[in-house]
Amino acid sequence: VSFYYHALAFKAFEFSGDWNDFYKLFVSSRVDSGLWFDHVLQWWKHRSESNVLFIKYEDMKKDLCAVVKQIADFMGYCLTHEVVQSIADQCSFLGMKENNSSNFSWVPDEARSSSSTPHLRKGTVGDWKSHFTSRQNEEFD
């Protein structure tokens, strides 16, 4: 769903359809980066390697400080609680939405589509449920 809004937002994608149109392209591997399942599975094969760390958005929404600490530990850094909190504040949805470096406000208007939505749209877990039909959900699972 995020990729759908991203494709709508930028002219370079040359996409102007609705969610159902995008879904068909997505599941048939006719979007940038190919089939999402293939992309994720390629990395999943390396999940036990010492230089690979999987993080889920749901975990970040649940406890961003814990995830920041997990990343720091993975990278071999020992951070104080204050530094972890500062990073979490800056990496929170609100912090990123207000930061011009991460909210794509720097992208020139001529590169944006007229149907452009904010790059950081909602920041909620599970919004896909308001887009997927029952059939799409079954196919995706």
Image: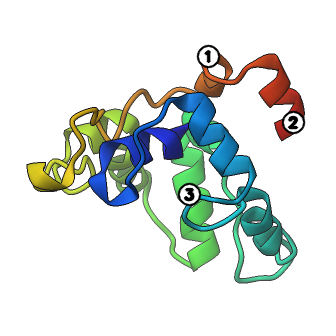
Q: Nearer the viewer, mark 1 or mark 2?
A: 2
Judging by the rendered image, the residue that carries numbered circle 2 is 139
Q: Give residue 120's position: percent from left, percent from top.
A: 35, 38
Amino acid type of disc 2?
Glu
* SS class, disc 1: helix
Residue 12 sits in which quadrant?
bottom left
Q: Quadrant of the C terminus?
A: top right
Q: Give residue 41's position: percent from left, percent from top.
A: 83, 66
Give the residue drawn at x 58%, y 64%.
71
Q: Is residue 63 left or right of residue 88?
A: right
Q: Is residue 131 above or below residue 27?
A: above
Q: Earlier in the sequence, mark 1 or mark 2?
A: 1
Q: Is residue 127 left or right of residue 95?
A: right
Judging by the rendered image, the residue that carries numbered circle 3 is 69
Q: Earlier in the sequence, mark 1 or mark 3?
A: 3
Q: Give residue 92's position: percent from left, percent from top.
A: 39, 40
Q: CA distance from mark 1 to mark 2?
A: 16 Å
Give the residue drawn at x 71%, y 58%.
36
Q: CA distance from mark 1 to mark 3?
A: 32 Å
Q: Give residue 23's position: percent from left, percent from top.
A: 65, 39
Amino acid type of disc 1?
Ser
Residue 108 sits in which quadrant?
bottom left
Give the residue drawn at x 52%, y 26%.
124
Give the residue drawn at x 20%, y 57%.
101
* SS class, disc 3: helix
Q: Is residue 101 left or right of residue 10?
A: left
Q: Kindly identify which numbered label has been placed on residue 130.
A: 1
